Image: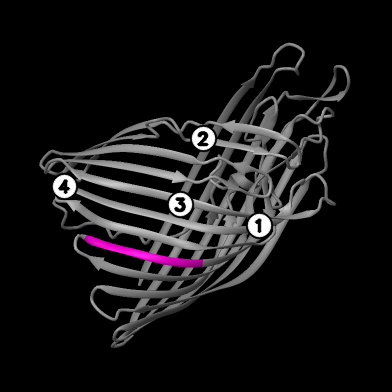
């Protein structure tokens, strides 16, 4: 039996000064504070109830409380040519409680093994948004869900393995995705969250074949996924802009998505000093949704696209003390409900040097060394537009680690736990 408890608290202040060319709109500032508290408690129990069987049980309690404020002197145009009114200060609180329990049973039948499981979850949220001069807006949700899973593995020989699996999972919206307080803005676009987002659910069936070879192994796989209430980036016309030029960039739930495809991965020792891990996938995806979120009567359209992704990670042993890492990724062009998205690519380089008789490590890493990571798109929905976003992807990091003691009393490694949160929107911002 294992018990784990985590508590974290952070405060992220942001102060922005927005200046515009004469005649565009009045300058203004945003003084934003994001405060968040998170509590996580886990209890895990494992019992080998039979010679070839094992039972796993667990309970989890997760609470996230978020409070956000935006103090601003921003003004919005109410009448041409230059009559403005104060936008007003705003605040947003978002409390999320998740209670869950799981049970897994593993059994080995010789060359065949299986794992059957289920997770039960109660998910509650309450969000309150206050904007000066407007009525308080409140959003609540209370969802009970069962997530079944089944894994069957067959090992006909030492070098061959077949696996068939089914699982249902959830990706809940992240705090920033539901926060209606502006995240950033430009003269033409403002990014905000959507407090009405609901979780997206994925039912997945996968079949994989793994073959051990001299120097490593490779895996071939196929999958089918059905995703309900897909969370993705979306845009609509800013209702406060009478010129219909400015946009609101947010997140939205789209209709169901079906995806099926092939995956390939390779773990191979090319030389004594060089090991590589590579993977690629190619899949077809069909999406349904509306292109204009500001129009409740906008028709539903269907978009089908084919996507290719690839990545490779290389590890080079230069000496007993020095190791180098080289990582590269490529994400192919694709089309979704609103945008045609260009390809994305990035190369990272890192190094690790052992010092102080193996007790210390110097780490160095540069991400996106060629400064190629960017999001580029064009669209005709809901109107003709094209754009490119370039964020601070080229970064350098240097760190030092030191291990105290003789290593006899190492702390237990924490169990890998998925937060089940949807990150970003299709790899964009």
Q: Is residue 27 magenta?
A: no
Are the residues flagged by discs 3 and 1 in contact, CB closer than 8 Å?
A: no
* Mark 4 surroundings: few (<14), some (14-19) or many (≥20) residues within 10 A: few
> Distance between the Cα atoms at labels 4 and 3?
41 Å
Residue at (23, 61) in percent of width and height? 216
Mark nearer the viewer, 2 or 3: 2
- The residue labelled by disc 4 is 273
Q: State whether residue 176 is above or below residue 413.
A: above
The mark nearer the N terminus, 3 or 1, is 3
> Distance between the Cα atoms at labels 1 and 4?
45 Å
Are the residues flagged by discs 2 and 4 in contact, CB closer than 8 Å?
A: no
- The residue labelled by disc 1 is 287
Q: Residue furthest top?
A: 22
Are the residues flagged by discs 1 and 4 in contact, CB closer than 8 Å?
A: no
Image coords of residue 369 (percent x, y): 37, 31
Mark nearer the viewer, 4 or 3: 4
- Relative placement, left or right, of 205 versus 412 is right
> Distance between the Cα atoms at labels 2 and 4?
33 Å
- The residue labelled by disc 3 is 7
The mark nearer the N terminus, 4 or 3, is 3
> Distance between the Cα atoms at labels 1 and 2?
24 Å
Image coords of residue 269 (percent x, y): 21, 54
In this picture, which residue range is highlighted in magenta? 216-223
Residue at (61, 71) in percent of width and height? 145
* Mark 1 surroundings: few (<14), some (14-19) or many (≥20) residues within 10 A: many
- The residue labelled by disc 2 is 374
In depth, the one of 194 and 159 nearer the eye is 159
- Residue 420 can be seen, yes or no: no
């Amino acid at each position: 039996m294992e018990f784990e408890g985590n508590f974290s608290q952070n405060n992220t202040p942001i102060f922005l000064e927005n200046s515009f060319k004469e005649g565009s709109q009045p300058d203004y500032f945003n003084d934003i504070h994001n405060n968040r508290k998170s509590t996580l408690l886990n209890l895990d129990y494992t019992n080998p109830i039979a010679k070839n069987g094992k039972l796993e049980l667990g309970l989890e309690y997760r609470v996230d409380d978020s409070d956000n404020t935006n103090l601003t002197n921003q003004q919005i145009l109410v009448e041409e040519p230059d009559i403005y009114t104060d936008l007003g200060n705003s605040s947003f609180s978002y409390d999320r409680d998740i209670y869950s329990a799981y049970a897994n049973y593993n059994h080995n039948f010789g060359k065949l093994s299986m794992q059957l499981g289920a997770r039960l979850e109660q998910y509650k949220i309450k969000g309150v948004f206050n904007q000066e001069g407007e009525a308080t807006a409140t959003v609540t949700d209370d969802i009970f869900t069962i997530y079944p899973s089944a894994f069957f593995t067959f090992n006909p020989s030492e070098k061959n393995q077949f696996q068939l699996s089914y699982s249902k999972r959830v990706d809940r919206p992240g705090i920033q995705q539901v926060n209606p307080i502006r995240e950033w803005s430009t003269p033409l676009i403002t990014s905000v969250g959507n407090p009405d987002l609901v979780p997206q659910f994925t039912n997945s069936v996968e079949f994989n074949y793994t073959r051990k070879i001299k120097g490593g192994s490779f895996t071939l796989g196929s999958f089918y996924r059905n995703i309900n209430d897909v969370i993705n980036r979306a845009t609509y016309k800013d209702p406060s802009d009478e010129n219909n030029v400015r946009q609101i960039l947010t997140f939205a739930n789209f209709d169901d998505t079906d995806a099926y495809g092939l995956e390939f991965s390779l773990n191979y020792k090319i030389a004594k000093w060089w090991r590589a891990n590579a993977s690629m996938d190619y899949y077809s995806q069909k999406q349904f949704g509306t292109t204009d979120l500001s129009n409740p009567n906008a028709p539903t359209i269907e978009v089908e696209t084919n996507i290719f992704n690839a990545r490779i990670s290389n590890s080079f042993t230069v000496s007993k003390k020095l190791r180098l890492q080289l990582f590269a990724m490529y994400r192919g062009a694709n089309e979704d409900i609103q945008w045609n998205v260009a390809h994305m690519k990035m190369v990272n380089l890192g190094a690790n040097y052992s010092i102080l008789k193996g007790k210390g490590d110097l780490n160095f890493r540069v991400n996106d060394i060629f400064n190629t990571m960017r999001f580029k798109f064009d669209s005709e929905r809901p109107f003709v537009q094209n754009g490119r976003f370039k964020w601070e992807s080229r970064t350098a990091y240097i760190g030092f680690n030191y291990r105290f003691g003789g290593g006899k009393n190492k702390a237990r490694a924490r169990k890998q736990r998925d937060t089940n949160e949807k990150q970003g929107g299709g790899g964009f911002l």
